[in-house]
Image (cartoon, coloured by chain):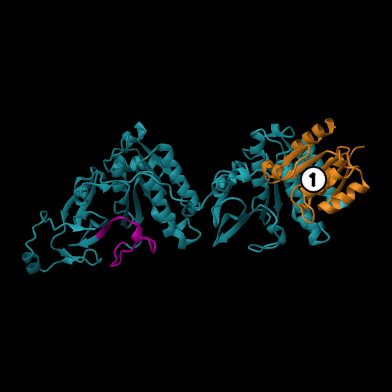
Amino acid sequence: MSAHEFVSHLPRFTSGIPGLDRVLNGGFFAGGVYIVEGAPGTGKTILANQICFYRAKEGQRVLYVTLLAESHSRLLQHLQDLSFFDAAAIPKHLTYVSGFRVLEEGGLRALLDLIRKELRAQGANVVVLDGFAAVGESAETDREFKKFVHELQVQAGLGTCTFFLLSSGTSGEGSVQPVHTMVDGLVRLSDRVFGVRAQRELQVQKFRGSRYLRGLHSFEISDDGIRVYPRLESSSATSGEGGGSRRLIVGFPRLDAMIGGGLRATSTTMILGPSGVGKTVVGYRFLACSTTEEKGLLFSFYETPERVLAKAKGVGIDLASAHDRGDVEFIWQSPVESTLDAIGWRILESIDRLGAKRLFVDGFNALESASAHPERVPQFFAALNRELQARGVTTVYAAELHQIFSHEIAAPTRGLSPLIENMIIMRFVELRAQLRRTLSVIKLRDSEFDPTICEFCLTSHGLDVVDSLDGAEKLMAGASREAPRSQSRKSGARKGRTRPKRRRG
Amino acid sequence: MKTIVIVDDEFGLADVLTATLSDIGFSVVSASNGKQGLEVMEEHPPDLVLLDYMMPLLDGAGVLKAMRAAPKLASVPVIMMSAVPESVVRAQCQGYAAFLRKPFDFETLLNTVEQVMAGQ
């Protein structure tokens, strides 16, 4: 006899909360008893009601028992502006009853009787007890409280209904109460403050019968209710296509020549440089090469779509045609008040929707500042790139170097360099009393590259590579100067023609 | 009023079944092991017994055997309940009227009770 014959699999149901089922590896188990715990204002009631309305929409019957002094009319008033709220579902599919007075007057036994009778009368598939802490406060002994929870479990099994017990969690974060050992799952909601920002976080602390994504996952509450963003690095990597030896041109012939004909497909490239040096122009050119078969996505933290088109036109890059054909899409993301995971999932969902193969993220630094936990940026970046590579996407990030002239060139975040396959540096240098722009490739994984430090100009035709800066030295050290004549002569360098030996990255 | 005896060691289940079946008009008495179950049946002659298969002191098969040997209980219908498949239970004991695989829902329970009662 196989295990499947001996014990039948419990059916699951989807919660209707985007992202949560992914954290739960497929949704809640029907017939389970789950505690949703969190301080007041963390979103327990919205989470429960969102599940209720979703299940009601799916044709199920839902019973919502409040143990709070708050009236149902007040509760519904607060919910009615949320998009999932459907007045037509009440009371046909969703019934609100108060257990407050029953609990006050008859204790736990009377409340159990009420639940049992209402559950039978409504034929409910989902039951919510809002204000579960009141049950614990009403219990005369721990044993009585445990017995109450156990009877709910039996009710859940017999009625094939799922219980959600909403508790304000007076025990404090991380603590374990005896009742936690009895239930099938524990979901904790919190609202943490980092500096002046607050970030909502969800943690599944227990989930019987299934693996789940552990740790903290950020979530947001909008007019559409709750949306959970599973921590990207906690998800298992999606397997997908490799890039092979195929290359994607950037679109500037001299630069493409320096990198062996283009960026290796599915690779990750970081363009580093100070503000105004021309990083975005390179990214726009890369996107302008998009085709119907190889669509592009611009994810910008700075420029709105209108400004993108105007800016590209100003440097002679025709992004408008690709945009009009639907081969390139622009997404503007506010650099403030968003979480790292929300941004990551927005990028991935946009890629999936468009089927894009070229991605330019303009403003890597905004990604960093979106993180409430800066130490996780490298892991997040690795996970995001793994997902993008699995989708066959070739990615270019523009990252700002804060100092315009400096002897120091560092990746924006510590620990990031090993994760970046290709690195291009664009800098301002001062030479012969002129401010000049330079471009150099400093890393190209598994490929040869031309290590020339080129001077370029931004013109109405785009980015024109003018020359190699032979005869100058200490360009990368931020202290450029003319090399002594003898040295320059010895090297046999001639302006604009030198092709140094190719270097392997 | 018909009397149902529930014999089950699972904490809470007997209480909930008792309350539910009482709600719909049965007289219900419960016991938490097989030995106690036989004592309860002596005191409250049942019209139907809901009997768990795996229990301490005396299991469901032992209770059923004892019932069939007792003149007053020999013809009382039994609904056997267990989390293990019926094929496993049937290999160990026979003579029950119906089988309920745990976990079961209210409707399945009530339908089974009604069918067994109707067949009496």
Residue A193 spot, x, y in % from top left: 57, 60
What SS does tag 1 mark?
strand
Q: Check the image and report above or below for A83 versus A266.
A: above
Residue A484 spot, x, y in % from top left: 11, 69
Whether residue A302 sits left or right of residue A115 in the image: it is left
Residue B45 spot, x, y in % from top left: 91, 43
Q: Check the image and report above or below for B117 versus A500.
A: above
Q: Nearer the viewer, residue A241 or A362?
A: A241
Segment tinted magenta in the rendering:
A404-428
Q: Identify the residue at horizontal 55%, vertical 56% (top origin).
A: A214
- Residue linked to disc 1: B51
Q: Which chain is orange?
A: B
* A30 in magenta: no
> Can you tell which quarter of the image residue A222 is in?
top right
> Can you tell which quarter of the image residue B1 is in?
top right
Q: Identify the residue at horizontal 37%, vertical 42% (top origin).
A: A297
